[in-house]
Structures are given as structure tokens and as C-alpha cells.
Image (spheres, helix red, strand yellow):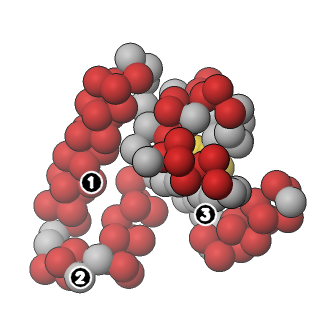
């Protein structure tokens, strides 16, 4: 499905090993990352169940999700999830506003 969607028009695909699946099309590959403190803040702002969790519980949940993502990526690609060498542009969102980053990426790519 990823190849079908990418073959029809320009698109943004988040996750699902799309960088690897589309490697023959030479996609522009982004890695967006941040430190744990920033992840916790964003989860509290956007996650409904985060309000009921302590910071420690939320950190454990984030680490669990990241571990699952890493295993999934490793299984399907035999590569390391989050390895900056696999990306064209890596952006640390730790001290940045996501909306401003999106606008900057849009200007950079277009």
C-alpha cells in the first residue's frame, strides 16, 4: 500500500518502515526526535490518558513504545531505528515549536 500511495502522488508517510519500503524511489527521509522531558510535555499536552499518569509512568510508556518501534523497524529492515545515518534530515524538537518546524521543513523541501 505504501508503494501504491507513493506512486500516485507526493505524500508524507509516517513510520511503517516507509523509508526502507520506498528506498528505490529515493524518498526524502526525516527523523524527528527530542529529549525525554520534551516527550513528556508533549504527551501531557496531546494525550488524553497522560493526565492520569505520573512522570515516571509516562516515561515508562514512552520507552515501551519506542522499544516496540525499534523492534518493528529492525525486524522488517534489519536496520537500527533512529540511526541518524538512515535519514536525510534530522531535527531535534527539544526546544522548538512543532508548528514552526513544520513551516521550516515545508520551505526547505518545496
Q: Which residue is tagged 1?
A: 62
Q: Nearer the viewer, mark 2 or mark 3?
A: 2
Check disc 2: other Cα within 10 Å, few if <14, some if 14-19, many if 20+.
Answer: few
Q: Helix or strand or loop: what does disc 1 sit on? A: helix
Q: Nearer the viewer, mark 1 or mark 3?
A: 1
Q: Would you say 70 lies left or right of 17 here?
A: left
Q: Would you say 90 lies left or right of 3 here?
A: right
Alpha-carbon distance for marks 2 and 1?
A: 14 Å
At x 29%, y 77%, the residue is 47
Q: Against 66, is 104 above or below?
A: below
Check disc 1: other Cα within 10 Å, few if <14, some if 14-19, many if 20+.
Answer: some
Task: Determine if residue 92 is in view.
Answer: no
User: Which mark is first along the chain, 3 or 1?
Assistant: 1
**Residue 51 image offset from top left, x and y in percent:** 20, 81
Q: Would you say 89 lies left or right of 69 here?
A: right
Q: Which residue is tagged 2?
A: 48
Alpha-carbon distance for marks 1 and 3?
A: 18 Å
Q: Which residue is tagged 3?
A: 95
Q: Are marks 2 and 1 in contact (CB under 8 Å)?
A: no
Which residue is nearer to you in this view: 18 or 100? 18
Which quadrant of the rendered structure holds the C terminus? bottom right
Amino acid at each position: 500500500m505504501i508503494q501504491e500511495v507513493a506512486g500516485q502522488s507526493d505524500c508524507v508517510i509516517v513510520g511503517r518502515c516507509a523509508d526502507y519500503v520506498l528506498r528505490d524511489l529515493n524518498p526524502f527521509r526525516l527523523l524527528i526526535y527530542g529529549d525525554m522531558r520534551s516527550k513528556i510535555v508533549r504527551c501531557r499536552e496531546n494525550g488524553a490518558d497522560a493526565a492520569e499518569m505520573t512522570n515516571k509512568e509516562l516515561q515508562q510508556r514512552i520507552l515501551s513504545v519506542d522499544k516496540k518501534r525499534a523492534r518493528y523497524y529492525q525486524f522488517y529492515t534489519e536496520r537500527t531505528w533512529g540511526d541518524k545515518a538512515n535519514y536525510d534530515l534530522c531535527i531535534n524538537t527539544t526546544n522548538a515549536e512543532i508548528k514552526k518546524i513544520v513551516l521550516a521543513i515545508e520551505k526547505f523541501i518545496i
